[in-house]
Image (tube, rainbow, N blue to C red):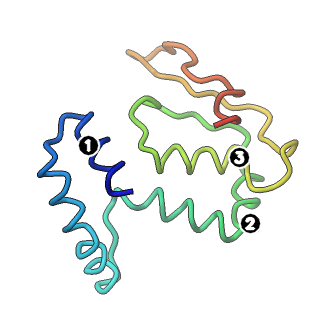
Amino acid sequence: VKRDCVELAMRLGIPQSSALLALDVFPEYQARHAAAGTADPSDLAGMAYRLLLTRPMALNLIRSKLNHIIVDEYQDMSVSQHALLRIIVRGVVEEDDVMNRYDIMDVVMGGYHGVIAKREKLLKE
């Protein structure tokens, strides 16, 4: 995993030495958050994902209240935000129990720029 993280960082233009330093410091950073009972804002989507994955009743409650999901700036979503969106759309239940309608759009200057992700693509990922 460490090698994959470093390779990804280097493809994004982050020097190898910086990526390795971040990987060394990150466990301590997380441990301090856990000890203090705090969380980094970037961790919130992942925490919500894990909560919904381990508590299907909560996931079903959220899914039952949503008819549509509109996401602005979809192209800027993180991996954990995408996973959270995916579990809410797909759920952890039967494949047929998928929200019937949703749109992922990029809003540009007050108008709809267009659908940038199709239902089938999100459901398959």
In the image, 54 versus 105, the foreground residue is: 54
In the image, 55 versus 95, the foreground residue is: 95
**Residue appearing at x 31%, y 64% in the figure:** 40
**Residue appearing at x 16%, y 46% in the figure:** 16
Element under disc 1: helix
Q: Residues within 10 Å of mark 3 (few under 14, many from 20)?
A: few
- In the displayed structure, does residue 110 sit left or right of residue 102? left
Seen as rendered, the residue at the extreme front is 3
Sequence-wise, which precedes: disc 1 or disc 2?
1
Asked if disc 1 and disc 3 are in contact, CB closer than 8 Å, the reply is: no
Tell me the CA gap for discs 2 and 3: 15 Å
- The part of the image, by quadrant, that contains residue 54 is bottom right
The spot of residue 29 in percent (x, y) is 24, 72
Query: Residue beneath label 1, please?
Result: 9
- Mark toward the viewer: 2 or 3: 2
Tell me the CA gap for discs 1 and 3: 36 Å
Q: Residues within 10 Å of mark 2 (few under 14, many from 20)?
A: some
- Mark toward the viewer: 1 or 3: 1
Query: Residue beneath label 2, please?
Result: 56
Question: Is residue 21 positioned above or below 97 on the image?
Answer: below
Quarter of the figure with the N terminus: bottom left
Seen as rendered, the residue at the extreme bottom is 35
Query: Residue beneath label 3, please?
Result: 66
Q: Amino acid at mark 2?
A: Pro
The spot of residue 99 in percent (x, y) is 77, 40
Element under disc 3: loop
- The part of the image, by quadrant, that contains residue 120 is top right
